[in-house]
Structures are given as structure tokens and as C-alpha cells.
Image (cartoon, coloured by chain):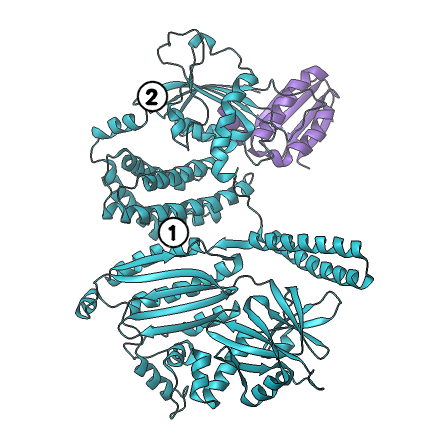
Chain colours: A purple, B cyan
């Protein structure tokens, strides 16, 4: 699966590998959202994302909204060109 | 992104091809009538739609080329560029080039080959000449025709709320933003997520995104609005200009309907918003009434059609075929039961099934006109190539026939047309010398005739050289040296394979090339082709095709214990063969039908049925094309809807039988191949019988 998840101390390391698009959004969401709140911190590595679309963006925004509610602090450790471009297009900072 | 929109892109490719087809037709229309504003509008819309959708898929090469074409077309529409032959020619070439772009770039995902790129450069150069001529005049004209088109950059406020179905419909909101960027500059954009529900009800495949955009662009409202054509149905869109002088009114929204008369643009009411109201949230209720008339307007044309996979249609027709058999079986059983109410209900069912069958078959029927119209371009190009002035006249374009047949008949028709232009119609000088108008005429015609469709290709050229064909046929041993075949037979010899490679017979060469292939293709469609020619007057090729390939209305006849099906469309009448008549006509082999000579075929003998003939026999009078004959049978069993089951390969050589069908009772009935039977008699008659009969059969 494209979502790599491992816990180190109080930080969950999350890496998404491949597409973050409508094709993967549902699977990723099912794996990802339930894990919010499991650890106080979550380090998000977006550097391996090859492609991102509106559905992917929406998932990212969802995680961003839900994480604080669940008590997890998000931290982005890396982002690929595809991600940077998409975020720039929408004038967003994650 | 291209992977993401794969399916939508396929639709785009199909639709773009259709648009180009329409563009080409309109161009040809414009060529014959330069003042036709509708045609100009149609051409512009086609190019515009292709550009818009190509942009959506990020197909840059298509967008950039189409943009130039569109620009020229816009000038044409404004009247700042005049229609002339050169412009039409370059636009036709441009539409060809766009088709190539779509095939290469969109369909194969490849880049254009160098020769094509060179061609593109060339086209661009020619097009640019049309772009520049009157820079002062052009913007004025643009303003006059389109009050919303601004001369300078202005600021727009765009509010987008994507509906939940957007992702599922294969759209990506971000691609619209990207495409929007090609029209101008996004000054500021706010991504809105307030529509996202709580985590429990949130669905990764539903779209909850929204954007507020400040957009600076020189494009008009219509152009910006068209960016969102593909999501209009699933989306709330508001586009307002915000740097206009504030209108002296209290309401924030001032509706302006100027653009409503342009069907392709301005689906959302243009409003002008006061700056202080810009930030106020717009309630959906406020937007919906604006949106409603728009969608219906745009869909009026598209909504009339549903794209269905042809396989599904075939499946349906196949099922309906089985249903027909099953329902025939049920009514047969009901009849044996002597139960009135049961019989009544089965007959209602049969009636309905028949209607379903008709409906299902009609689904496959498409007018031949589309195929015909394609030839306009062919005729135009070939006639220019040959330096001949040829006019194509099309009639009967609305005649409908089966989709499969339409698809397969295109090539043979094209071949026949090319032949007619190349070898049939003479050069202008030769025509004038022969006392004919310099302009040659080709006539394509289609009509229904006794259960088949007839396609006619007529030219007013020199006609065929009868003697040369005969000579050549004798040379090749196709005709016995002493025989004197009729003109008709001689002309039809050019369909023989032996003629396909006519060498060095100057006034014949080409006329025969591939004609055997044409004939074979038509025969495969269970059709026939024949040809008539008047020296100096022209040639007519007639193609006769069955309307459909799957189901026929049959007429059941019995011989002894066996049942045969005659296609009902070919049955003209049934008469009783009295005993006296029977003896007399048996000897002569024909019957006097109200003074007409009717050759008889004794099916009992023809198919070698044993046992004595019944005392009272019947004659079924059948007609196909110009041939008419009587089939002598024992019993007439009535009408029957017949699903054709093709015969196996083993029976491929069987003459006179075209297929089989299963009756309601489970018995097998053979379907008579009436055309083959009649041709057989005609041939036999020509050879062995006396002249009057020959006359009667050939008429």
C-alpha cells in the first residue's frame, strides 16, 4: 500500500508513496484518518508523491483539520514538486 | 492528470472528432454560401469547444494551434476578415491538422512527427496573415458584436463551489484552475473547505472543495465562463466583474442578459457586484435560480442523445430476438390449449414484443446522411486535384439503415465515387466538346425500396464503353466467343475479379480497379450491386442493401412436412394455383399473371422434396430489384418474425438458402435467399428460354 506508517517514540512517521489522487484517496483515507490521535505527533513525508489532484488535496486538508481535533500535531518533513505545485496553485500552506 | 481523466479524455477525443466533422461540413457549406452566418458560428463553436476541452486535459499542442484558428474564426465572425477560397482552403487544412493533433497528441499521447510540425508552421503562417490585416478595425468589431468583451484587462471575482459528484464524474477541480491560468492571472485564491462535513460522514471520493478567486484577465465573461463548461452541472459558479463603476442601485447584483443570445456562452447570469458586497457569502438559494435556465439551455442539444456502447445494443437486440422466438412459442402453445383468455393475453404479449423489436431495431438505425456528407470533402478535394469542376448532389440523406451497414458501406461508396470522378466525368473541355455543361455532376441518392435500401451513385460522365468491356471480357474468357450478352450483363462484368487489374486499356483503366472488392464488400452485407450506363450520358451504380442484418419479417410456407421462410418484404402477393393452371404452367414453367409473364419455381423440385405434391398448391409472388417470380409451395402458413441464425460454414456453398431460424414449436425452418433464387432463374431463363420470357423477367 502506498501509505507507510511507523511509530517512533511519540511520533508517527507517515510517508505517502506514489499518487495522491482520486484513485488512492479512499484507500489512503481509510488507513490514515483512524490513526490520527494515536500519537501526539505525526511527521508527514510528502516527498514521494508523484501526482496530486483535487481529491488528494482534499484529503490533505481533511487530515490537517482533523489532526488537532484528535490531539495530534502535524509536521511536514518533506514535499515533492507535485505537492508544492498543487499547494501553490491553491495558495495553501500545509 | 492524464491518467486521472482517462475516460473523460476518450469522450473528448470522440467529441472532438465529431466537432471537426461538423466544422468541415460547415466550412464546405460556407464555401458554397459565403454569407452564411450560421455556418461561421458553427465553425467557431467547434474550434472553440475543442480548444476549451483540450485545455482542460492539458493538451498544450492542440490548444496553441486551435487558438490561432479560433482567433481567425473570431475575426471572420466579427466581419473583419472576409470569406475567400484561400481562407476556406487553409481552414480545411487546419481542421485536418487538428484531427491529426487529436489522433496523435490526445489519443496516442505522442508528439507530432517533424513533417506534421512543418505543416503546422506553414498553416500558422498563413493563418497569421488573416490575423493581422486590420488591427484597428478588429477590436471595434469585436465590441460591436459582444458588448461584454473588454478591450483591456479587468478584475473578476469568481466564486466556485464544486458539487460532491465532481470527482466521480472524472473531473479534477484543480485542472479548471490550471486552465483558468491560461486566460489570465490568478491574483488571489482562497481554498475553501467549509463544506467538508465531520469525519464520520466525510467521503474521500466526494468533492467538498470551493474556491474564491480574484482573477485578472482580458478575457470576457463568456470566455471565463466557458472554462467551467464541463462542471457546470455539478457546480455553483459565479463570475462577476468588480472593477466597474458602481452602478447607482441598492442591490448588489445587477443582472445583465446581453450574452444570453449566444448559445455557447454566458450560461450564468452576469452580475456586477459592489466591492463591499464581495466578501459576503452567497447563499446557494441565491445562485440556483441563476444556474437553472443555463444548464437546460446548454443541454438542449446534447440532452437529446445518449451515448450507448454498440455492444450493449447488439446484446439487447440479440435478447429481443430470443424473446421473439419465445413469445412465438408461447402463442403457439396457447392456441393448442383452447383457452380464450390465455390466447388473448399471449397475443397482447406478442404485440408488445413486436413493438419492442421494432423499437430495438430502430435504435440501430442511423441516417445515411452523415456518411454522404463526408463525401462532400472528398469530392471537393478530388475534383480540385483532377482539375475538374464537379458538383455533388445529395438526396435521401435522411434514409435510415443499420449502423453496421452504414459503417461498412463507407469504403465501397468512396471507391465508387472516386472512380466516377476520376474516370466517369470527363474534363471540362471534353464535356464542352460533347455539348454538355462544363460542370460535372455526381448524384448520391438513397431510398427505401421493398425492404431494402438503395444507394445510387450517378454521374453525368461519358458512360462505359460497352464494346471495350465485351472485347476484354472475351479476351479473358469471361464471356464465350459466340455469346451475345445484354448490355446490363456486359456492364456488370466490370465487377468480375478478372477486370480488377485492367492494364493499359486507357478508357477503361481504373474503372475496374477494385470493383470486385467493392462487390465483395457489398455481398458480405447481403447486398447486391449493379450498374447501368448510357454512352455519353453517364453511369448509375445501384447498391441494394438489406435494412438490418439480424431480424426479418418472414412469411412461412410449407412444403410437405418442411417449413421455409420467405422474407416478407419481398412477398408481393399470394395466389392459388388451380389444378388446371397447375398442369399448364408446369409444362411452360411460367404463369400468366394478369397478362404478365411470371416464371415459376417449384420449390418442391428445387429442394428435392420427395412425396406427392399436395392437390392445391399456392404461388407466392416475390420480387427483388427488377426480378419477379412465383414460388410454388404447398401451404401458406402466415407471417412470422424471424431471427436469422446464420448457417454454419459447412453449408456455406448452399445456394438459395440464406440462413435458418427456430420456430416457436422448436422446429427449424430454412430462410430462402430470394435474390439468389431469382438470379438463378434469370440466368437459366436467359440461356434457355424464348425471347419473350427473357423480356418479361428482365423487364
User: Label 2, on which residue?
Assistant: B153
Closer to the camera in the image, B7 or B605: B605
Judge left or right: residue B612 versus residue B629: right
Can you give x and y, in whole percent of width and height, for residue A49 in the image? Answer: 58, 33
User: Label 1, on which residue?
Assistant: B113
Badge 1 crowding class, 10 Å Cα cut-off, few under 14, some 14 to 19, many 20 or more, is few
Quadrant of residue B377 within the rendered picture? bottom left
Mark closer to the observer (2, 1): 2
Quadrant of residue B396 within the rendered picture? bottom left
Residue at 31% across, 82% down: B468
Closer to the camera in the image, B279 or B379: B379
Task: Please indicate, yes or no, whether residue B249 appears anywhere in the rendered image.
Answer: yes
Residue at 33% across, 42% down: B39
Closer to the camera in the image, A72 or B677: B677
Is disc 2 in contact with disc 1, using a CB cutoff of under 8 Å? no
Q: Give SS at disc 1.
A: loop
Can you give x and y, in whole percent of width and height, for residue B674 in the image? Answer: 56, 74
Q: Earlier in the sequence, mark 2 or mark 1?
A: 1
The chain to which mark 1 is attached is: B
Above or below, B7 against B463 in this view is: above
Query: Distance between the Cα atoms at labels 2 and 1?
Result: 37 Å
Judge left or right: residue B331 versus residue B694: right
Badge 2 crowding class, 10 Å Cα cut-off, few under 14, some 14 to 19, many 20 or more, is few
Q: Which mark is residue B25?
A: none
Quadrant of residue B443 within the rendered picture? bottom left
Residue at 71% across, 53% down: B349
Above or below, B182 against B404 in this view is: above
Q: Give SS at disc 2.
A: loop
Can you give x and y, in whole percent of width and height, for residue A45 in the image? Answer: 62, 27
Judge left or right: residue A82 versus residue B480: right
Closer to the camera in the image, B274 or B114: B274
Amino acid at each position: 500500500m502506498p501509505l507507510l506508517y511507523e511509530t517512533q517514540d511519540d511520533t508517527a512517521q507517515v510517508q505517502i508513496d506514489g499518487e495522491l489522487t482520486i484513485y488512492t484517496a479512499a484507500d489512503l483515507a481509510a488507513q490514515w484518518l483512524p490513526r490520527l490521535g494515536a500519537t501526539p505527533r505525526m511527521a508527514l513525508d510528502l516527498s514521494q508523491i508523484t501526482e496530486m489532484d483535487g481529491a488528494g488535496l482534499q484529503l490533505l486538508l481533511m487530515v490537517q483539520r482533523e489532526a488537532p481535533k484528535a490531539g495530534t500535531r502535524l509536521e511536514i518533513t518533506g514535499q515533492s514538486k507535485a505537492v508544492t505545485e498543487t499547494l501553490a496553485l491553491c495558495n495553501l500552506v500545509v | 492528470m492524464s491518467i486521472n481523466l482517462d475516460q473523460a479524455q476518450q469522450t473528448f477525443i470522440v467529441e472532438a472528432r465529431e466537432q471537426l466533422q461538423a466544422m468541415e461540413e460547415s466550412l464546405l457549406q460556407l464555401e458554397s454560401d459565403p454569407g452564411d452566418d450560421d455556418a461561421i458560428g458553427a465553425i467557431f463553436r467547434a474550434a472553440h469547444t475543442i480548444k476549451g476541452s483540450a485545455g482542460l486535459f492539458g493538451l498544450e499542442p492542440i490548444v496553441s494551434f486551435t487558438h490561432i484558428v479560433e482567433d481567425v474564426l473570431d475575426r471572420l465572425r466579427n466581419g473583419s476578415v472576409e470569406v475567400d477560397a484561400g481562407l476556406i482552403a487553409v481552414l480545411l487544412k487546419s481542421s485536418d491538422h487538428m484531427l491529426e493533433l487529436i489522433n496523435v497528441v490526445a489519443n496516442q499521447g505522442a508528439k507530432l512527427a517533424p513533417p506534421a510540425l512543418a505543416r503546422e508552421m506553414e498553416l500558422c503562417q498563413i493563418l497569421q496573415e488573416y490575423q493581422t490585416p486590420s488591427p484597428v478595425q478588429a477590436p471595434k468589431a469585436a465590441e460591436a458584436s459582444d458588448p461584454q468583451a473588454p478591450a483591456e484587462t479587468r478584475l473578476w471575482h469568481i466564486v466556485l463551489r464544486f458539487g460532491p459528484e465532481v470527482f466521480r464524474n472524472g473531473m479534477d477541480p484543480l485542472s479548471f484552475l490550471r486552465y483558468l491560468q491560461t486566460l489570465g492571472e490568478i491574483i488571489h485564491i482562497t481554498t475553501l473547505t467549509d463544506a467538508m462535513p465531520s469525519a464520520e460522514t466525510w467521503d474521500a471520493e466526494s468533492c467538498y472543495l470551493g474556491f474564491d478567486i480574484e482573477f485578472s484577465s482580458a478575457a470576457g465573461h463568456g470566455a471565463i465562463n466557458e472554462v467551467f463548461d464541463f462542471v457546470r452541472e455539478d457546480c455553483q459558479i459565479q463570475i462577476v466583474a468588480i472593477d466597474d463603476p458602481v452602478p447607482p442601485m441598492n442591490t448588489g447584483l445587477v443582472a445583465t442578459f446581453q450574452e444570453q443570445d449566444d448559445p455557447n456562452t454566458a450560461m450564468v447570469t452576469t452580475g456586477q457586484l459592489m466591492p463591499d458586497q464581495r466578501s459576503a457569502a452567497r447563499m446557494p438559494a441565491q445562485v440556483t435560480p441563476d444556474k437553472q435556465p443555463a444548464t437546460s439551455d446548454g443541454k438542449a442539444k446534447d440532452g437529446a442523445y445518449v451515448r450507448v456502447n454498440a455492444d450493449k445494443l447488439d446484446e439487447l437486440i440479440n435478447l429481443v430476438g430470443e424473446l421473439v422466438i419465445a413469445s412465438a412459442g408461447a402463442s403457439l402453445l396457447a392456441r393448442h390449449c383452447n383457452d380464450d383468455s390465455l390466447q388473448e393475453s399471449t397475443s397482447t404479449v406478442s404485440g408488445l414484443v413486436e413493438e419492442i423489436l421494432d423499437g430495438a431495431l430502430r435504435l440501430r438505425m442511423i441516417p445515411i446522411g452523415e456518411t454522404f456528407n463526408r463525401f462532400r470533402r472528398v469530392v471537393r478535394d478530388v475534383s480540385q486535384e483532377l482539375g475538374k469542376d464537379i458538383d455533388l448532389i445529395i438526396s435521401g440523406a435522411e434514409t435510415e439503415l443499420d449502423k453496421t451497414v452504414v459503417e461498412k458501406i463507407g469504403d465501397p461508396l468512396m471507391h465508387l465515387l472516386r472512380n466516377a470522378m476520376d474516370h466517369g466525368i470527363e474534363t471540362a473541355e471534353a464535356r464542352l466538346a460533347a455539348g454538355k455543361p462544363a460542370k460535372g455532376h455526381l448524384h448520391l441518392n438513397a431510398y427505401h425500396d421493398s425492404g431494402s435500401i438503395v444507394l445510387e451513385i450517378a454521374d453525368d460522365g461519358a458512360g462505359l464503353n460497352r464494346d471495350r468491356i465485351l472485347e476484354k471480357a472475351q479476351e479473358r474468357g469471361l464471356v464465350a466467343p459466340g455469346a451475345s450478352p445484354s448490355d446490363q450483363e456486359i456492364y456488370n462484368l466490370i465487377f468480375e475479379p478478372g477486370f480488377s487489374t485492367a492494364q493499359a486499356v486507357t478508357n477503361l483503366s481504373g474503372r475496374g480497379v477494385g470493383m470486385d472488392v467493392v462487390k465483395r464488400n457489398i455481398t458480405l452485407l447481403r447486398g447486391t450491386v449493379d450498374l447501368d450506363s448510357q454512352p455519353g450520358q453517364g453511369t448509375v451504380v445501384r447498391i441494394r442493401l438489406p435494412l438490418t442484418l439480424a431480424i426479418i419479417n418472414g412469411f412461412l410456407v410449407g412444403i410437405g412436412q418442411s417449413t421455409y421462410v420467405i422474407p416478407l418484404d419481398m412477398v408481393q402477393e399470394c395466389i392459388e394455383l388451380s389444378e388446371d393452371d397447375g398442369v399448364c404452367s408446369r409444362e411452360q414453367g411460367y404463369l400468366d399473371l394478369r397478362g404478365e409473364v411470371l416464371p415459376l419455381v417449384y420449390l418442391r423440385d428445387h429442394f428435392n422434396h420427395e412425396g406427392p405434391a399436395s392437390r392445391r398448391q399456392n404461388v407466392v409472388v416475390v420480387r427483388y430489384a427488377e426480378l419477379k417470380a412465383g414460388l410454388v409451395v404447398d401451404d401458406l402458413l402466415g407471417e412470422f418474425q424471424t431471427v436469422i441464425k446464420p448457417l454454419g460454414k459447412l453449408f456455406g456453398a448452399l445456394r438459395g438458402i440464406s440462413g435458418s431460424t427456430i420456430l416457436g414449436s422448436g422446429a427449424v425452418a430454412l430462410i430462402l435467399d430470394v435474390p439468389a433464387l431469382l438470379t438463378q432463374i434469370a440466368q437459366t431463363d436467359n440461356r434457355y428460354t424464348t425471347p419473350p420470357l427473357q423480356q418479361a423477367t428482365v423487364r
